[in-house]
Amino acid sequence: MSGEQVLGTPAGVISKNRIFFVILILILAGAALTSLYSFLLFHVITEMFSILIAGAIFIIAWNTRRYLENNYLLMLGIAYLFIGGIDFIHTLAYSGMNIFIGYDADLPTQLWIIARYMEAVTLVIAPLMFGRAMKPYRVLGIYAVVTVMLVIAVFVPGLFPACYIEGSGLTLFKVVSEYLICILLLLGAFLLWRRRDHFEEDIFWLVVASIICTICAELAFTFYVNVYGFSNLAGHLFKVASFALIYQALVVSSFQRPYETVFRELRQSEAEVRKERDRFQRYLDIAPAMFIVIDRNGDLKLINRKGADILGYPAEEIIGKNWYATFLPSPIRNEVSNRLGNLIAEDIQPGDEIAENLVLTKGGEYRRILWHNVVIRNAEGMITGTLSSGEDVTDIREAERDLHLKNAAIEATQDGIALLSMDGTLHYANAAFTEMTGHDETALVGRSILEMSEIWAQGDSVFHEIIETGSWFGEQHGTMPDGRSTNLLVSATVISDIRGEPVNIVISFMDITEMHRFRMALREANKKLNILSSLTRHDILNQVQVLLSYSELLDETTQEDDPGHEYIGKLLEATRRIYRQISFTRDYQDMGVKAPLWQEVTFVCAEGADAVDRNDIDVSCGTGSLEIYADTMFVKVFYNLFDNAVRHGERVTEINITFNEEPDGSGLLSVVDNGVGVGNDKKERIFDRGFGSNTGLGLFIIREVLGITGISITETGTEGEGAHFSIHIPAGTWRYGPP
């Protein structure tokens, strides 16, 4: 920027204050000219000029102290009152004034030194007062006491070191003091530089220039021998310049730009308030709770990010809206308004400070919020509104409701349910369980299930199996409190925490005594029916055998060209079919009679593989320790599937059995061969009764045997690639046993 000066640089300061500097140069020149006429006149003019500036600084600083949070100006103003006072005494004591009789030129020199020490120390301490609390009257009192003590020390002979000796000039103390004062002034300038952000930059440079002029004045005063010498004159001119710069920086600038100087701290305070407000808002925004501020009219004045997220609006769209009319369901608006109104009126009722109510979101959804409410007061103590912190408890209340319903269901069930720790210690028992044991819950909690022989007759082995496998299902005998023997269906499951660590065992006990009684009665009836069926089958087979024998004799004794020979052949085939079907029922007469069992698939496959020639067909069972809860005729399932592969697969050389767990917890057992497969039109018909070229009952019986425990079977293979029988096993009816 050619030809322009940047404000905030020394050149910019000179350019902006050029009129002041022109006047200052004229004043300095005029003062210097007065020394040609009388040095005493020159001295009085320069000292009085600095005294007036010092007084003006004090007047401005003292009368604006209530607005000044920048303590630099206030402390400088107080100090310059006393510095000017000492300079005034120095002027009166100067050689030639003849006011203080009996004192030589050492007195004004001593007064000069104590005034400059006070000025230098003040310029060092003042920058340290930024941001600190300061009591003006206490500082005023301290300066007054120090000033009086120093002035007394100067006027009492021998108390203060000599600074000037007639005929020989300045003493060592005076010279060393001037250099020490210069060092203090440099330190003051450095401290002021570090805190320059508290000033307008042009004012800052004027103050720095003032300090530099003061340093030059002190250096000049280290050289003079005569109090009327040139060094003395130069020192006083630098002092005039120093005080004039202070005058321009702190007096004239304060009147010309009071909003930039005297009230600069007000702006800085406002910035600090905004900064604190923003910091407070950031703290609120990271809080997991909802925070809102509502004024006396019910309008929202503040909301944090969590609150805006819950309501579904941007925060800026929420501020200023009426809380009751916008965000509350209409049935509860008056209730909530009265609640917060009681707080504002300081008529607090129970439930006003901590309350729970619904809020209405932008999407029309209701959320339940638990509020903690307090009032907000201004500086005068007047209540201006309320601050509320809210926790969204919608999901918690829903969970509590669901938990209550589930607990009610558990308590209402007729099955005994107990919650155990992993060592078997009982922690909870429902009403049915306590009724089964004859003890209330308090007597049961803390006891080990292994000690309750009336309800747990399985011993340690089954409990260890539960721990190792994660579940157990079976029947046992128990004893009711009245001594009655019961049959119980027991189901135990290990439950884990969110990390997958086992933490508890849930056991249910179902009283199946009546069911067991019916089962035993049915078993006895089936046993008798089986006996009757066996005797009847035996008698029928005997008669069929006779019929078959006579049919064979007729076939052998009748010529092939005889017209009746064809009918005899059909009679013989029908008789043989009847014989096979009746014989087939002998193998399956016990289906469903005995209770289902957990059966290991590997063993069942090995037994069923007797239906095939192991030299020609390779049977592979890759199910490991898989166990399936199925009818005792489960082995016949594999026997018939293998037999069916041999009879109809034509080219079967291998049969593979595999198992996979389904996403819903069920299992899929696959029996696959590499034969010709099953045609698409026969996939369902092969399970129909009577379909097939042998008995027509094999696959039909398989489906019935599996269906006893809810297992189903379908054929899902591709014709020409082999048969694929998919056996679907419901969840809970398969498990892995010990390896």
Image (cartoon, helix red, strand yellow):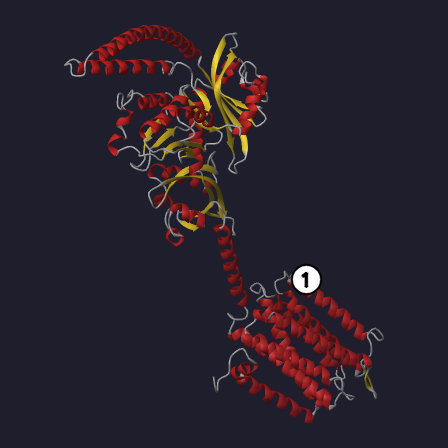
Residue 491 seen from this side: no
Residue sitting at 64 percent across and 80 percent down?
A: 242
Q: Residues within 10 Å of mark 1 (few under 14, many from 20)?
A: few
- Relative image position of residue 442 (x, y in whole percent): 56, 19
Residue position for label 1: 138
Above or below: residue 718 compared with residue 607? below
- Relative image position of residue 101 (x, y in whole percent): 80, 81
Which quarter of the figure has residue 210?
A: bottom right
- Work out whether residue 560 or residue 216 is closer to the camera in this orientation and state it: 560
Residue 559 seen from this side: yes
Instruction: Check disc 1 and give the amino acid type.
Output: Arg
Q: Say whether residue 616 is left or right of residue 260.
A: left
Residue sitting at 49 percent across and 54 percent down?
A: 282
Above or below: residue 499 compared with residue 690? below
- Work out whether residue 62 or residue 234 is closer to the camera in this orientation and state it: 234
Which quarter of the figure has residue 22?
A: bottom right
Which quarter of the figure has residue 640?
A: top left
- Work out whether residue 149 or residue 358 is closer to the camera in this orientation and state it: 358
Residue sitting at 48 percent across and 42 percent down?
A: 373
Q: Say whether residue 407 is left or right of residue 723.
A: right
SS of the residue under disc 1:
helix
Q: Say whether residue 657 is left or right of residue 224.
A: left
- Relative image position of residue 59 (x, y in whole percent): 60, 71
